Image (tube, coloured by chain):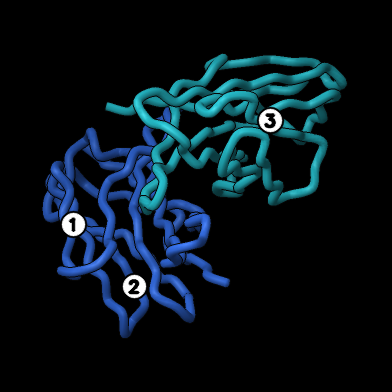
């Protein structure tokens, strides 16, 4: 069966510090991968998606970036965090030619 | 472009009472429809989905949703709620496209609070 992992689970970072969040999927090959942010009262916002290694599409301009160095690994990064980057970050995967996205447990990020 | 409206941001309901969480969508093409549930500090879990076929879909824990094409709705119902149903529920739509990226568009969520 397929599983999706995210780490860390919780992160507290000062403004201006770098960020690296990791997402990995097991039990499937060549998935589509997604990063979402969930901020209080704002629902889920799609940040990035990837259809393959090295292929990243950005949905919202911001100071975040994403990379996919391996087939089942998706990384969300920032060089300098802003207060507005605080939120709950969710990774999701979808199998090829399938309709359903499955979500990871999330990372709670607090920027102080 | 599609959009999703969840009409109620919060729904309080007494235990063992019925509940309906409303979801309307707008799209000019056929869509897939989903309900996800999020418990506090957890990711989203798929509750049920409509892809095709029977317009009434059910989950394993007693929820059901009915696709109504004429009213562009996909309301979620449960005849008798339990304390453990307290969570936030998200309705989502995905464009039907064989070559597309199946992007999901989410509603803003409905917080269901079950009162003992």
Residue placed under numbered mark 2 in the picture: B73
Residue drawn at x 14%, y 43% as measured from the top left? B60
**Subunit of label 1:** B
Gap in Å between the C-alphas at discs 3 and 1? 38 Å
Q: Which mark is residue A81?
A: none
Q: Quadrant of residue B61?
A: top left
Do marks 1 and 2 share a chain? yes
Spatial distance from mark 1 to mark 2, Cα to Cα?
A: 13 Å
Label 3–label 2 contact, CB within 8 A:
no
- Residue A74: % across, % down: 59, 28
User: Can you say whether B116 is above or below B108 in the image?
Assistant: above
Q: Chain of mark 2?
A: B
- Left or right of B115, for residue A36: right
Question: Circle 3 sits on which residue?
Answer: A67
Q: Chain of mark 3?
A: A
Q: CA distance from mark 3 to mark 2?
A: 37 Å
Q: Identify the disc placed on residue B64.
A: 1
| Chain identifier matching the blue colour in the rendered picture | B
Circles 3 and 1, Cβ within 8 Å, touching? The answer is: no
């Amino acid at each position: 069966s397929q599983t999706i992992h995210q780490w860390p689970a919780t992160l507290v970072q000062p403004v201006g510090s770098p960020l690296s969040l990791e997402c990995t999927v097991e039990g499937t090959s060549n998935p589509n991968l997604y990063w979402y942010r969930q901020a209080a009262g704002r629902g889920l916002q799609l940040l990035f998606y990837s259809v393959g290694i090295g292929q990243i599409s950005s949905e919202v301009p911001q100071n975040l970036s994403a990379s996919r160095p391996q087939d089942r690994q998706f990384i969300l990064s920032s060089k300098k965090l802003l207060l507005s980057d605080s939120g709950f970050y969710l990774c999701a995967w979808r199998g090829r030619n399938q309709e359903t996205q499955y979500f990871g447990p999330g990372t709670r990020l607090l920027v102080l | 472009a599609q959009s999703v409206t969840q009409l109620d941001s919060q729904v309080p309901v007494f235990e063992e009472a019925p509940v309906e969480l409303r979801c309307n969508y707008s799209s000019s093409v056929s869509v897939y429809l989903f309900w996800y549930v999020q418990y506090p500090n957890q990711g989203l879990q798929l509750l049920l989905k409509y892809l095709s076929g029977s317009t009434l879909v059910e989950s394993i824990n007693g929820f059901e949703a009915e696709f109504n094409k004429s009213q562009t709705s996909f309301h979620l119902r449960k005849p008798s709620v339990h304390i453990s149903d307290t969570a936030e529920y998200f309705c989502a739509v995905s464009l039907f496209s064989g070559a597309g990226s199946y992007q999901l568009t989410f509603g803003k969520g409905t917080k269901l609070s079950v009162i003992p």
